[in-house]
Image: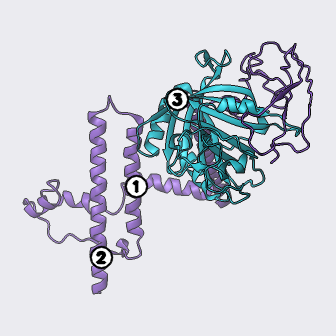
Amino acid sequence: MRKILSPRVRGYRQDFLKIAQVYPVPYLTGGSESSCVVFNLDTMEAPPVTMMPVTGGTINMMEYLLQGSVLDHSLESLIHRLRGLCDNMEPETFLDHEMVFLLKGQQASPFVLRARRSMDRAGAPWHLRYLGQPEMGDKNRHALVRNCVDIATSENLTDFLMEMGFRMDHEFVAKGHLFRKGIMKIMVYKIFRILVPGNTDSTEALSLSYLVELSVVAPAGQDVVSDDMKNFAEQLKPLVHLEKIDPKRLM
Amino acid sequence: MQREEKQLEASLDALLSQVADLKNSLGSFICKLENEYGRLTWPSVLDSFALLSGQLNTLNKVLKHEKTPLFRNQVIIPLVLSPDRDEDLMRQTEGRVPVFSHEVVPDHLRTKPDPEVEEQEKQLTTDAARIGADAAQKQIQSLNKMCSNLLEKISKEERESESGGLRPNKQTFNPTDTNALVAAVAFGKGLSNWRPSGSSGPGQPGQPGAGTILAGTSGLQQVQMAGAPSQQQPMLSGVQMAQAGQPGKMPSGIKTNIKSASMHPYQR
């Protein structure tokens, strides 16, 4: 089955999930029960789950996030500590190229989609992700919470998005290590700026630090997840201070 | 009577063991001082002193224990004095007292200190009594206060020196870098292709499309969705030709909306 995008979509977030099949992409979202979806363009139709557009009924997945950074010279000690704390598996490195697309509509705030492809794993699907605004309000919640939709797609994703009217806003290369502990995913990666647009070979590091992200994708309402994350983050102190960083504060 | 005897015996045993411990630690301290004088460090000497002080404390506690009868009330009277060697006595005193004779007895069984020592003690007590209770109390308080001040100063110094020494080595993360990286991932600050000006380049998220109108294109472009299905998706107006990577930047912000249907196709 050729896995490509179906153009028969009416909306982005919920509808994508409704008319698609689930395809597990463990290395991208961490955990075996991730919810990535793949479309079928062969028959120009959605797979016959239901022929009518479904409204409502999807599980709203939220991403819980804690971020921090570590300087280059302390990376080794952090990696050792993570190897000890996290699930026992071969250390995984990744080299990804991420592009962020914006759709500017009549509304003031543009719609953002993130497309990510793996540069070192041949044959891996592209990864399309929507991240909502962080949910504010609960000061006791230790992690940043935002709505999250993850989809695996085929290679013609960028063409499709351009045809739909998206324009690429920025892109970067992320190179680093991936760890997992239960449903928690820990990524330690360095961000490289792409000097010549479209050319992923000419990159330069953005800073002398690695970004450390602890994230969990879970259904909405499970705030106990953030407590587990906070406990894990305690164990990484004082090497790294993982905290909830509000991106709006940094604009 | 019996109970008292038993108590006496028990307390004597306890006292004996305590004194033996004290003797041992004193002995080892003296050995240490004599043999390792060159290598001795102040903390090691302090350790020995602390050990001795602890043992004296326990000795005091044993003596003050409620089950201990007042030894003051007991009197030891030598019954037999003989100039012959006594093997039992030798064994019990570990070879120190071979003979229980009239030379040994006054030293071992004395209850009063030396006359000189007694004089000094009497002097001290009269001095203390002369000062008066209030003055004595004040002196005690001032001594306590000075001691606590000194302790505080020392502990503060220790704390500061420790943290000062550690801080330059232990910096494993830089908060500025954290913020920069998070901003880069969240909305592309410093990554934007259009303004490749340093890591702090303004990647303004509010106007991502404003700066890239191609000179020469009319802007009247209609983008048709490939493979439009039977659902009548109205044409999306190709508004900003914000193709990434175009070097011709004209921050004019011209937006031309053509025939955008009333129902935005991507309304959520």
Spatial CA distance of label 2 from label 3 is 67 Å
Q: Could you say where residue B128 lies in the image, as x and y percent from the top left?
A: 57, 56
Q: Residues within 10 Å of mark 2 (few under 14, many from 20)?
A: some
In the structure shown, which secondary structural element does the residue marked by tag 1 occupy? helix
Q: Residue at x 31, y 82 (%)?
A: B4
User: Taking B236 as reference, is A232 above or below it?
Assistant: below
Do the residues indicated by labels 2 and 1 lie within the same chain of the protein? yes
Q: Residues within 10 Å of mark 1 (few under 14, many from 20)?
A: few
Q: Which residue is mark 1?
A: B54
| Chain that bears disc 3 | A
Residue B144 is tagged as none
What letter labels the chain drawn in cyan?
A: A
Amino acid type at circle 3 is Ser
From the viewer's perspective, is the residue at label 2 or at label 3 nearer?
A: 3
The answer to whether any part of residue B243 appears in the image is yes
Which residue is at the front of the view, A115 or A66? A115
Q: Which residue is mark 3?
A: A74
| Chain that bears disc 2 | B
